[in-house]
Image (tube, rainbow, N blue to C red):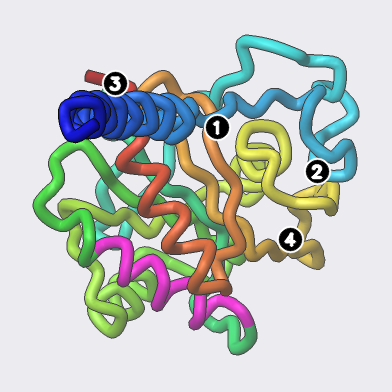
Amino acid sequence: MLTFFKDYKYFGIVLLILSIIIISIFYSILNVEKPLPIYQPAKVNFEMVDSTIQHVSKYHKIADFSLLNQNGNTITQNDYKDKIYVADFFFTTCQTICPIMTDHMALIQKEIISDNEVMLLSHSVTPEIDSVAQLKRYAIKKGVDDKKWNLVTGDKKHIYELARKSYLAVKDNGNGDAYDMIHTENFMLIDKKRQIRGFYDGTKAEDIERLLGDIKILKKESK
């Protein structure tokens, strides 16, 4: 009788070890990080997409751009070549959502300050007010690191087309005239192929945490 129980004791130990291994394997499979989606105009809320590109279901990328940053330097897509970056739209005189968004961008900057793969890009939606000098004052006030984060100004229609047709960031069509102004709380995560990989509410701390996590996923994907 004792021999019988002794044999089953060893069998039970082996069974327990096998169970732990099997559970660990299933846990690993279920917790594999899923790749981030690639956002296409046809798969985004149509209100956020210009009517001319609502049919586009693949190959959507951020268009070429040429704008001036807080130092008066011309910033183009080449400055973000082979970079992951976070983009948004703001204006320096905004007293509502922009201060919160800028503070959150500053938080992201702090987290990625030593990461050569990641940058930030903030577009002014009131370029007639946000001159290079104004952006520089704002950059100093907000602790912007020139090597990581560009605040850009330039032709208003060009900026508005980027917002509506490239970043899919705003509901308003916007015509870029003197009386027109778009406003959005969206942060967009852009990959090294200039594709949109995520949308986030720039006023919400939980979305910023999710964004930081998604940056890590993108970095693994690009290796």
Q: Name the residue under label 2.
A: 48
Task: Please name the amino acid that badge 1 sits on.
Answer: Ile
**Whole-percent x, y for residue 113 in the image:** 15, 57
> Would you say residue 103 sits in the magenta stretch?
yes
Task: Please name the amino acid that badge 3 sits on.
Answer: Ser
User: What is the quadrant of residue 7 in the picture?
Assistant: top left
User: What is the quadrant of residue 12 in the picture?
Assistant: top left
Label number found at residue 182: 4
Q: Which of marks 4 and 1 is in front?
A: 1
Q: Residue at x 85, y 24 (%)?
A: 54
Q: Which of marks 2 and 4 is in front?
A: 2
How far is mark 1 from mark 3, CA to CA? 14 Å
Q: Earlier in the sequence, mark 4 or mark 3?
A: 4
Per the rendered image, the range of residues in magenta is: 97-109
Residue at the farthest left position: 114
Of the pair 132 and 52, the residue shown nearer to us:
52
**Which part of the image, by quadrant, shows the C terminus?**
top left
Q: Residues within 10 Å of mark 3 (few under 14, many from 20)?
A: few
Q: Nearer the viewer, mark 4 or mark 3?
A: 3
Please tell me how many numbered marks the rendered image carries. Answer: 4
Q: How crowded is mark 2: few (under 14 residues within 10 Å), some or many (20 or more)?
A: some
Q: Mark 3 points at which residue?
A: 222
User: In screen coordinates, is 28 left or right of 153?
Assistant: left
Q: Do the residues labelled 2 and 4 touch (CB within 8 Å)?
A: no
